[in-house]
Image (spheres, grey):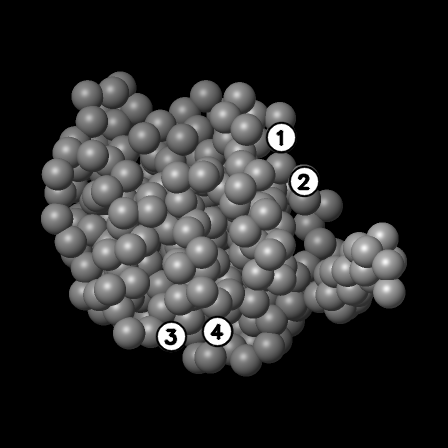
C-alpha cells in the first residue's frame, strides 16, 4: 500500500473513532444517575464543574476580565457548591472566584497556599472570608470523600513560591469512572507525580497548562492512559495553545482529544462505567 493511501486510511480511522464517541450526542439532559464533567468554554482560562447525585464541585473559576462562569452554572441549574477549588493564584484560574462566592452558598474552599499580590487574589480572599465557607490547603496523598465522589490529591507536596509547582492536581473517582485534573502543572511536577503514585490511570485527562508544551509529557500520558483528553484554551489565543508538540504527541499515541477553543463547552457524562461526550452547542 502506498504511503499516501496509508495516510488517508489513518485519517479515515481517526474520524471513525471520533464518530463512535459522538454517535449518541444529544442536546437533551441525561436522566440516569451518574456524573457530569463540564469543561466550560471560558476563553483562555479554566473552569471545570464535576456534578453528581450528591455533589457539586467547581475547579477554577475563569478569567478576571470575563463574567461567564456564573452564567454557565445557572444554565445547568446549580444552586450551591460543596467544594470550590482554586488550583493556583493566577488570574485565569481564580478570576471570578469572588463572583462565584458572592452568588452561591459554598461549603468549602481549597487553595494551594501560595500567595499572590494581585488584586484578583485579594478579591478572592476577601470573598472567602465573607462567604463563611470552610477553608483548606490540600497536600499530596490526601483522600477526601464528598458524597459518592472520591478525591485523591496528587499535588502539591510542598510550596516553593512557583505557582505552577504548587498547583493543586486531583484525581476524582466515581465508581469505575475517573478524571484527572491538572491545572497548570508542568513536566517536573508530572514526573514527581508518576514516581509517587502507583495508579494514575483515568478515563479523562485535562491536559496541563492549556495544552502548553511545558506539560503533558509522553511518560505522563502513558501513566494516565486516558480514554479522552481535554484542554481549555481560547480560540486564537496569544500563547499558541495548544502547542503542536502536545497535539502531535497525542496523535502519535492514538489518543482522542478535544478542546474548548474548537468545541466550546465539553460535557462528559458517565454512569460510573461507560461514558458519553455530549454536544453543548
Q: Are marks 4 and 2 in contact (CB under 8 Å)?
A: no
Q: Which residue is mark 2?
A: 262
Q: Are marks 4 and 3 in contact (CB under 8 Å)?
A: no
Q: Which residue is mark 3?
A: 148
Q: Residues within 10 Å of mark 3 (few under 14, many from 20)?
A: some
Q: Which mark is residue 177?
A: 4
Q: Residue placed at 67% from the left, 40% from the top? A: 262
Whether residue 122 is visible here, answered yes or no, is yes
Of label 4 and label 3, which has the lower sequence position?
A: 3
Q: Which residue is mark 1?
A: 235
Mark-to-mark CA distance, 2 and 1 = 7 Å
Of label 4 and label 2, which has the lower sequence position?
A: 4
Mark-to-mark CA distance, 1 and 4 = 29 Å
Q: Quadrant of the N terminus?
A: bottom right
Q: Are marks 2 and 1 in contact (CB under 8 Å)?
A: yes
Q: Secondary structure at mark 4?
A: strand
Image coordinates of residue 48 in percent, x first then y, are: 46, 49
Whether residue 49 is visible here, answered yes or no, is no
Image coordinates of residue 130 in percent, x first then y, are: 22, 35
Amino acid at each position: 500500500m502506498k504511503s499516501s493511501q496509508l495516510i488517508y486510511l489513518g485519517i479515515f480511522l481517526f474520524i471513525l473513532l471520533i464518530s463512535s464517541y459522538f454517535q449518541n450526542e444529544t442536546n437533551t439532559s441525561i436522566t440516569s444517575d451518574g456524573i457530569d464533567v463540564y469543561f466550560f468554554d471560558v476563553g483562555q482560562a479554566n473552569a471545570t464543574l464535576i456534578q453528581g447525585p450528591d455533589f457539586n464541585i467547581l475547579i477554577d473559576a475563569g478569567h478576571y476580565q470575563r463574567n461567564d462562569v456564573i452564567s454557565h452554572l445557572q444554565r445547568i441549574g446549580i444552586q450551591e457548591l460543596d467544594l470550590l477549588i482554586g488550583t493556583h493564584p493566577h488570574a485565569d484560574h481564580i478570576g471570578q472566584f469572588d463572583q462565584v462566592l458572592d452568588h452561591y452558598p459554598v461549603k468549602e474552599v481549597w487553595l494551594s497556599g501560595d500567595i499572590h499580590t494581585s488584586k484578583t487574589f485579594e478579591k478572592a480572599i476577601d470573598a472567602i472570608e465573607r462567604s463563611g465557607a470552610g477553608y483548606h490547603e490540600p497536600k499530596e496523598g490526601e483522600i477526601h470523600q464528598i458524597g459518592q465522589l472520591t478525591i485523591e490529591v496528587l499535588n502539591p507536596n510542598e510550596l516553593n513560591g512557583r505557582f505552577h509547582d504548587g498547583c493543586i492536581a486531583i484525581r476524582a473517582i466515581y465508581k469505575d469512572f475517573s478524571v484527572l485534573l491538572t491545572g497548570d502543572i508542568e513536566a517536573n511536577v508530572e514526573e514527581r507525580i508518576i514516581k509517587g503514585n502507583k495508579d494514575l490511570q483515568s478515563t479523562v485527562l485535562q491536559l496541563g497548562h492549556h495544552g502548553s508544551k511545558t506539560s503533558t509529557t509522553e511518560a505522563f500520558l502513558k501513566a494516565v492512559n486516558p480514554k479522552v483528553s481535554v484542554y481549555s484554551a481560547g480560540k486564537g489565543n496569544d500563547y499558541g495553545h495548544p502547542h503542536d508538540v502536545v497535539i502531535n504527541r497525542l496523535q502519535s499515541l492514538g489518543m482522542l482529544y478535544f478542546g474548548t477553543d474548537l468545541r466550546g463547552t465539553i460535557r462528559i457524562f458517565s454512569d460510573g462505567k461507560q461514558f458519553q461526550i455530549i454536544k453543548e452547542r
